[in-house]
Image (cartoon, rainbow, N blue to C red):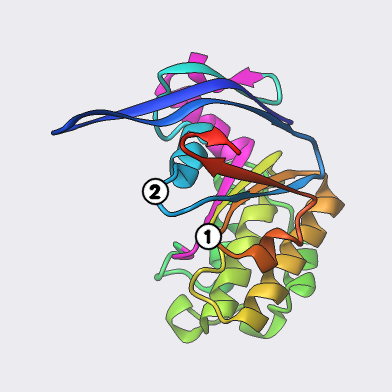
């Protein structure tokens, strides 16, 4: 599902170029959950961004299904994010002017993948039945994150990239949200790469990758 080979990424700073990723190689299979751990500033978010095609790489290759991200132009990378790769952030990024129901179906409709039956199943699985008419500001943090997860899976993506997805939630809510997300990954046979500082959450994943000094430790 995801194949990363000899990936390198650096940034220019007033002090010179900084090598953030120095030659990463790894694979993630369909239906697999992988936690990405490492100290702040080690490149976890950068790695997720380049896999999603949000930032260019210096060298190496990123392949999602049959598409090599580094060979695509911006329009094609946007299509990859619309159809194959979904992102979950700790900020939730819900659309404030839409109800819960509208938020869940928004990206699926844009991608031409709206499936009312599948959306209803997600709503039930994530316990959102009584919240569909509410707006994001009327929800708790845990409820907003469950809506964000429903929105992500509504498009039936091949790859899900999650950047500290429960960073704003308490421990019990974090566990519940991640358990639901991991169950959906197994059910849909998507692949999930989750950056997290939490060892407790990381140990729920099938595998842990540890990033240190731009390399896998």
Q: Residue drawn at (51%, 69%), measured in percent from left and top?
A: 167
Q: Is residue 168 left or right of residue 162?
A: left
Q: In which quadrant of the rendered view does residue 154 lie? A: bottom right
Q: Residue drawn at (71%, 25%), measured in percent from left and top?
A: 65
- Which residue in the structure is indicated by mark 2? 41
Mark 2 → mark 1, Cα distance in angstroms: 13 Å
Q: Which residues are magenta?
A: 67-92
- Which residue in the structure is indicated by mark 1? 164
**Vertical arrangement, residue 88 with respect to residue 110, above or below:** below
In the rendered image, residue 145, in percent from the top left (x then y), is placed at 57, 70
Task: Let me know if residue 81 is in the magenta part.
Answer: yes
Q: Residue furthest right?
A: 187
How crowded is the residue under tag 1: few (<14 C-alpha within 10 Å), some, or many (20+)? some
In the rendered image, residue 159, in percent from the top left (x then y), is placed at 67, 40
Q: Residue drawn at (62%, 80%), measured in percent from left and top?
A: 171
- Which corner quadrant holds the N terminus? top right
- Which corner quadrant holds the C terminus? top right
Comparing labels 2 and 1, the label whose residue is closer to the camera: 2
**Vertical arrangement, residue 141 with respect to residue 85, above or below:** below
In the rendered image, residue 114, in percent from the top left (x then y), is placed at 68, 50
In the rendered image, residue 20, in percent from the top left (x then y), is placed at 40, 34
């Amino acid at each position: 599902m995801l194949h990363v080979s000899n990936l390198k990424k650096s940034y220019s700073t007033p002090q010179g170029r900084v090598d953030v990723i120095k030659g990463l190689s790894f694979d993630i299979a369909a239906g697999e959950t992988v936690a990405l751990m490492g100290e702040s500033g080690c490149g976890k978010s950068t790695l997720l961004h380049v896999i999603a095609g949000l930032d260019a790489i210096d060298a190496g290759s990123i392949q999602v299904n049959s598409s090599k991200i580094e060979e695509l132009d911006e329009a094609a990378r946007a299509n990859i994010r619309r159809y194959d790769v979904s992102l979950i952030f700790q900020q939730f990024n819900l659309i404030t002017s839409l109800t819960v129901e509208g938020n869940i179906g928004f990206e699926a409709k844009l991608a031409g993948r709206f499936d009312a039956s599948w959306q209803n199943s997600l709503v039930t699985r994530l316990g959102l039945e009584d919240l569909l008419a509410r707006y994001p500001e009327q929800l708790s943090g845990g409820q907003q994150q469950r809506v964000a997860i429903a929105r992500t899976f509504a498009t039936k993506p091949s790859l899900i990239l999650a950047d500290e997805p429960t960073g704003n939630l308490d421990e019990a809510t974090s566990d519940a949200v991640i358990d639901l997300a991991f169950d959906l990954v197994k059910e849909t046979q998507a692949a999930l790469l989750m950056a997290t500082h939490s060892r407790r959450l990381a140990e729920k994943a099938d595998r842990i990758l540890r990033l240190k000094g731009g390399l896998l430790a």
